[in-house]
Image (tube, rainbow, N blue to C red):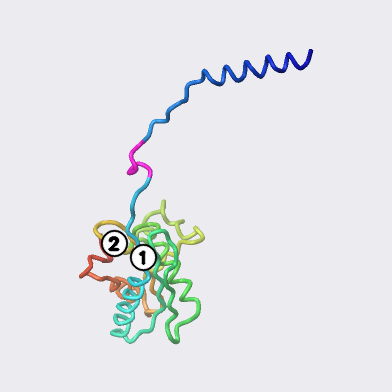
Amino acid sequence: MKIPFLLLLLSAYICMGQNKTEQKLEHYSIDQYVKPINNLRSEAALELASRITKAAYTKNRNVSIAVLDASGTTILILSGNDVGPHNAEASRRKAYTALSTKTPTLLLLRNAEQNADTKNLNTLPELLLLSGGVPIWYKGNIIGSVGVSGGGSPENDDWIARSASIPELEITTSK
């Protein structure tokens, strides 16, 4: 009795399964699923670090430098000669802050100080509201960021970081 009953259930299941129409998903174009992005590469990071170092030398400073790509991944960290060891991590966090906020950190710092609603940005673990971080742009899109520490003053760190441009390739620190 059990076997015929099981066969009846199985055949009903198979027949019902055959009658189901397949649901079709609405498909979108690839542009709705994937966005191509421009990203800094190691060759650009080395060139930016070279230009930053030259700018720092004009102010008789050695600086620590961090360069991140558009996803926030560290491409380069360079610890400056005779610069405190904390500056390498500070540079990375400045670069991360500039990247994630798409704002130079000196401007962010000054805006946060004046606005009670943004004053607590400094409580987020990875953000560092110190000058010396700038986003890197290519044709209006953010492609990475740099952070500079050890320039001797907030204005120096900001000025030195802003030297991270390769204008002949349209890689700049301003949108």
Q: Quick check: 26 above or below 92?
A: above
At 60% from the left and 20% from the top, the residue drawn is: 14
The 10 Å Cα crowd at callout 2, few under 14, some 14 to 19, many 20 or more, is many
Looking at the image, residue 174 sits to the left or right of residue 95; the answer is left
At 45% from the left and 87% from the top, the residue drawn is: 82
Q: Position of residue 123 (x, y in %)?
A: 50, 59
Q: Magenta residues?
A: 28-33
The answer to which of 23 and 127 lies nearer the viewer is 23
The answer to which of 46 and 105 lies nearer the viewer is 46
Give the mark nearest the N terminus, 2 or 1. Answer: 2
> How far apart are labels 2 and 1 at the CA level?
8 Å
Is disc 2 placed on a helix, strand or loop?
A: strand
Q: Residue 41 is drawn in which quadrant?
A: bottom left
Q: Position of residue 2 (x, y in %)?
A: 78, 16
Q: Amino acid at mark 1?
A: Ser
Placement of the C terminus among the 4 image quadrants: bottom left
Q: Which residue is mark 2?
A: 137
Is disc 1 placed on a helix, strand or loop?
A: strand
Q: Amino acid at mark 2?
A: Trp
Q: Which residue is mark 1?
A: 145
The 10 Å Cα crowd at callout 1, few under 14, some 14 to 19, many 20 or more, is many
At 46% from the left and 71% from the top, the residue drawn is: 90
At 64% from the left and 17% from the top, the residue drawn is: 11
